[in-house]
Amino acid sequence: RNYTYAICCQVLPDEARVADFRSVLGWSSAPQYRGLAASIWEVFHIPLALVRVIIPRSGTPLLSAIRPLPLNRLNSRERGYIDQQVRWLI
């Protein structure tokens, strides 16, 4: 980058891997991330999010990034979950 731009680097623990999941109203279609999705909803009140985690050797996910998940990018299972949880007033 020739010292032109500031960058942020995150050091990964040995043998760690990076994973992404989608959080919808504190729920994830991936069962292994449902607890973390619930925590993100409780702490940040973010209804729709793309979440990146680092999975170290211990297996406990470490939060790395939270990005917006646009409503129009939800899959049918996620839309179905929202329909079960939300009462729409039209």
Image (spheres, rainbow, N blue to C red):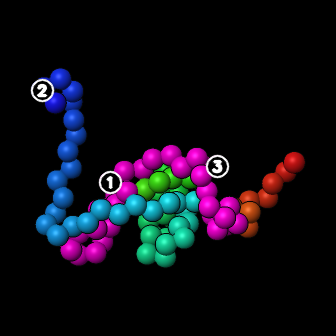
- Earlier sequence position, callout 3 versus callout 2: 2
The quadrant where residue 29 appears: bottom right
User: Which residue is depicted at the point 74% across and 63% down?
Assistant: 83
Q: Which residue is mark 2?
A: 2
Say which residue appears at 28% left-offset and 75% top-offset.
Answer: 59
Q: Marks 3 and 1, Cα distance to the nearest angstrom?
A: 24 Å
**Residue wearing tag 3:** 72
Q: Amino acid at mark 3?
A: Asn
Write the start and end of the magenta stretch as one range. Answer: 52-81
Number of the front mark, 1 or 2: 2
Cα gap from disc 3 to disc 2, whole angstroms: 39 Å
Q: Is residue 9 above or below residue 59?
A: above
Q: Quadrant of the N terminus?
A: top left
Q: Earlier in the sequence, mark 1 or mark 2?
A: 2
What is the distance, in whole Å, between disc 1 and disc 2 at their CAs? 26 Å
Which residue: 21% across, 27% down?
A: 5
- Where residue 49 appears, as percent x and y from the top left, is 51, 52
Q: Which residue is mark 1?
A: 64
Q: Amino acid at mark 1?
A: Ser
Secondary structure found at label 1: strand
